[in-house]
Amino acid sequence: MPTAPSTEPNAGTIYGELIEKLITEEGGRKASFEQRGITVITSSGVFVSLVFGIGAVATSQHFSVSASVRTVLSVAVAAFALAAVAGIVANWPMKYQDLTLEQLEKWVTPTLWEKRADPAARRAAEARVNVLRRARGRNARKARALITAMVLQVIAIGLVAAAVVLIAVGA
């Protein structure tokens, strides 16, 4: 006696849903890295303006800073500039892979469309895994750039604080 087809999803259905969920999450990570990169660019600009403001106030009052303070502030400005560059790298448009039109057109031809579902589901999942692999690689680059930007900002802020302390103590 033949058995009735199962109404439960096969493993491919479950794997496919997981793969699609992961691709969606990678898209969210990409957007998050890019947004934080923009924030780094903006805040670095604000901090550089602050450093120049300190310099303007100091020079307008016939106040002279030591060579060590000028050096510390110069390195801080350079670190802020490099942080902004790293923020730009985090926002750099990268080619993310997706399914090509050729792949999709091939899959909708009558010869492939009418075949059994299991091999097709596997081929589709393999293609989506390749999309996910490329997205994770690109997002890893964006993450490294963002971490670099944030570390540079922390260094620059520390240098500005050190310069202020040096000015306060008269060094």
Image (cartoon, rainbow, N blue to C red):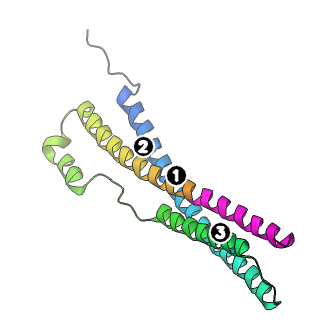
Residue picked out by circle 2: 20
Magenta stretch contains residue 140: no
Residue 38 location, x and y as percent? 57, 67
Q: Earlier in the sequence, mark 2 or mark 1?
A: 2
Relative to 27, residue 112 above or below: above
Magenta stretch contains residue 153: yes
| Left-right relation of 60 to 21 | right
Mark 3, secondary structure of its residue: helix
**From the image, which quarter does the N terminus lie in?**
top left
| Magenta extent | 149-171
| Tag nearer the camera, 2 or 3 | 3
Residue 159 location, x and y as percent? 70, 64
| Left-right relation of 6 to 107 | right
Closer to us: 126 or 143: 143
Say whether marks 3 and 1 touch (CB < 8 Å).
no
Closer to us: 66 or 4: 66
Q: Amino acid at mark 3?
A: Ala
Residue picked out by circle 3: 76
Q: Tell me if residue 38 can be seen.
A: no
| Left-right relation of 125 to 46 | left
Q: Main secondary structure of the magenta part?
A: helix
Q: Give the distance between the C-alpha atoms of the residues marked 2 and 1, in whole angstroms.
A: 14 Å
Q: Tell me the residue at 23%/32% (across/down).
A: 119
